[in-house]
Structures are given as structure tokens and as C-alpha cells.
Amino acid sequence: MSIDRTKESILSVADKLFSRFGFHKTSMDEIAKIARKAKGSLYYHFASKEDLFREVIAREMNNLKNQLAVIVNNTDLNASEKLKSYFIKRMAILNSAANYHETLKADFFERFNFIDDLRTELDEWEKENLGRVILQGVNSGEFLLNTDIDVLSEIAIMILKGLEIPFFLQDKYEKFSLHFEGLIKILSKGLSK
Amino acid sequence: MSIDRTKESILSVADKLFSRFGFHKTSMDEIAKIARKAKGSLYYHFASKEDLFREVIAREMNNLKNQLAVIVNNTDLNASEKLKSYFIKRMAILNSAANYHETLKADFFERFNFIDDLRTELDEWEKENLGRVILQGVNSGEFLLNTDIDVLSEIAIMILKGLEIPFFLQDKYEKFSLHFEGLIKILSKGLSK
DNA sequence: TTTGCACCGTAAAACAATTTTAGTACAAAT
DNA sequence: ATTTGTACTAAAATTGTTTTACGGTGCAAA
């Protein structure tokens, strides 16, 4: 078995267990046992349990970014359509990213500090990419620029992140995803000329 | 000392202690001692500790509602201005409502069920009053109605409540209150004709 | 209406005993 | 280079038990 396949299999098992039982209630022994690897192998590939968890989260985030990038780079969509697809897709993916949920929850009674860099990385990625969508809208004449693009991106992210907790931790996603269309209409129109 | 003054003094001390130390770390004995009342008096006026806490929260919420009502009923403001003042004022007041913060926090590891009725009451009040502001905007021709007013109010509340946790529990209020103007511009414009 | 005090039952804090678990070391195998 | 298996340690989590603190009551007196 190649080195990549071993690492992959560890990550895959870790992903399943972490998302099912959470970080603390999943042990390295258990991961090793189910992945049919020696514990030593886990530590050959990952520096620590936190490091392994971080990689799992990183993959969740990369998956998110890749799927969103498809939207951002789709030349068939105008800026409003992109914004709309972006918002809806983002929430839908995150809604099923169980490990990300745990890091959200953890913010309130403990801190997963070792995740912080991934978060800020995602933040910057989003700021950059939403910025590009807005810029496209401005260039095409769809949107009216009355503020800094940076600021607009931050506002959009602020809204998106604000909704994460009611949606994912208080299970309001189903209830409010109905109103999502309406919200995006307003935002999109709010930006438009 | 009149009955009202006794009750008032208990409430005032309870408010201070609860907001400083939280619900669990404030004891009825302590409240009685600092208010210079007998414990029996607390139970003469309030059925239980929860009941006392609920009154404290109720007062915070009434204060919020009263101040927002001034804005809603101000005949000098048009609908966009009202919406803007409403959003900003709401966040500013809630930012310093320490006991309300605790009930927010509590949502994640315990539940203050005895507060639920107050919450839903506030929710309904807000839906009603934001609805009136939007209606005013529609009537005056400022806003364009392309959806149900009820739905629009719910969306607005969804955003406002979504921001509560990052703002008040993760202390992002200072950081983002700068962008608040921009957000409101967008929302207001998103509703407008 | 308010006080002061003794009292009860329970829930949480504190403590100690026990078990799990992250992480290491290393010899052997591929 | 990569993987295994075992044995180990120090720290953390868990469990069971005891003690304490606290919400709440009852009541006589003012």
C-alpha cells in the first residue's frame, strides 16, 4: 500500500469518527484500529491528534472552497447570479460539514486554537473571492459601487457567518433556507444600480 | 419604605449582581444581604430565583422595546431612516444588556426555559414593529413590495439575531459596528424602489 | 409587609481512586 | 523510507463518594 493510500485511509476513518463522535470522544487507538493501521503509523503521518483533526477540517474547507470556486469562476453567470449561488451553496455545504460545526460549537466553552489559521485562511479566501464577484458586478454595470469593495465583502461575510450559529447549531437551517431567496434578492438589489 | 421601593431595590441589586456574576454564581442570600432585605422579603415579592431573574430580563427587554418604539413612532423619519436607526439602536442597546447576553450564551450548554416566553414575546413585538416600518415604506412609495411583509420582517430579524452571537459573545461588536452603516445602506436600498 | 432565624432536601463542589488516552521508544519487517 | 506491534509514561478523563452550599419553607414577632 502506497504512502498516499495509507494517509488517505487514516484521514478517511478519522473524518468519519470525528464527525460522528466529536474530537474528544474519538481516540487515536480507535482510529488506528478501524483504519487497520498501527498507532505508530498515525504518528508517522501526523504530528498529533490536533494535527490530524486539523487536516480533516482543512479538507472540509478545501472542498467548500473548490465548490465555491466553480461558481466564482463560472463565466456563464452574471454577478447577481453568482452572489446568489454562492450564498446558497455555501450554506448547503456547511450545513453538512459536521466537523466544522464542532469547531463552531467549541467557541463557546473551549477553544480549538489549532484551527485558527485555517479559519483566517478561509476568511481571506472568501474576502478575496466575494470581492472578485462584486468587482465583476461593478465592471459589468450591474452593481453600483458606493463603498470600498473590501468593506462590502466583509459585510457579506459578516452576514454569512452570523447565520452559521442559528442555522447549524440551533437547527434553523431548514426553517430559514426558505427565506434565503428573499434575503439574497434584497442584498443583490441593494448592491445594484 | 413602600412596597414598590422594596421591590425596586431588590430588582436593582439583582440586576447588578446577575449581570456581573451570572445567574448561577449569584445567590439569593447575597442579593438579600446587599439589598439589605431579609431573604423572606425576596420570596414575598418573587416566587423563585428564576422568577426574579425573569423580571430582570423583562426589564432589559422593556427598555429595549421602549427605546425602539420611540424610533418606530417618530413621525419625522421616513422608512429608510427608521430602519437604519432601528438596526443601530438595537445593537447598541443589546450590546450593553449583560443579562441578555447570558441567556444567549446559555443556549449552547444549558437552557433557560423560563425565559422562552419573554423571547417569543420580543420576537413578535419586533416582527410587528419592523413590519410597520416596512409597511410605512411601501405606502410612502420608498420601498418596493415584491414579497410578503411578514417574510421581509422575518428576514430582517434573522439577520439581526444572526449577528448577536458574533457581536456580543465573540466581542466583534466594536470591529463590525463600523461596517454597520454600509450594511444598512445595502438592505435599505435592497428594499427600495 | 418585613424581619430573622432555624430548618429541609437537593444539587453542586471537592476529593480521591481508577481508567483512558495521547504521545514516545524501539526492535523488527518490508 | 514506511509500517507494524508492543510496552511504557505522564496527563487527562471518568467514576464514585463525601461534604458543602444554596434554593426554598415555616413561623413567630414586629
Image (cartoon, coloured by chain):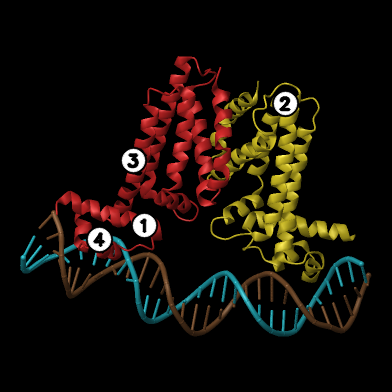
Chain colours: A yellow, B red, C brown, D cyan
Other residues around mark 2 within 10 Å, as few (<14) / some (14–19) / many (≥20):
some
In the rendered image, residue B60, in percent from the top left (x then y), is placed at 36, 45
- What is the C-alpha distance between the residues marked 1 and 4? 13 Å
Position of the C terminus of chain A, as image quadrant, is top right
- What is the C-alpha distance between the residues marked 3 and 2? 44 Å
Q: Earlier in the sequence, mark 1 or mark 3?
A: 1
> Which residue is the site of mark 3?
B62
Question: Is there one chain holding both mark 3 and mark 4?
Answer: yes
Asked whether the viewer can see residue A50, the reply is: yes
> Which residue is the site of mark 2?
A138
Relative side of B134 to B63, left or right: right
Quarter of image, res B128? top left
> Which residue is the site of mark 4?
B35
Of labels 3 and 2, the one closer to you: 2
- What is the C-alpha distance between the residues marked 2 and 4? 61 Å
What is the chain identity of the residue bearing mark 4?
B
**Residue occupying image coordinates x 67% and y 38%:** A90
> Which residue is the site of mark 1?
B18
Amino acid type, residue under disc 1 in the picture: Phe
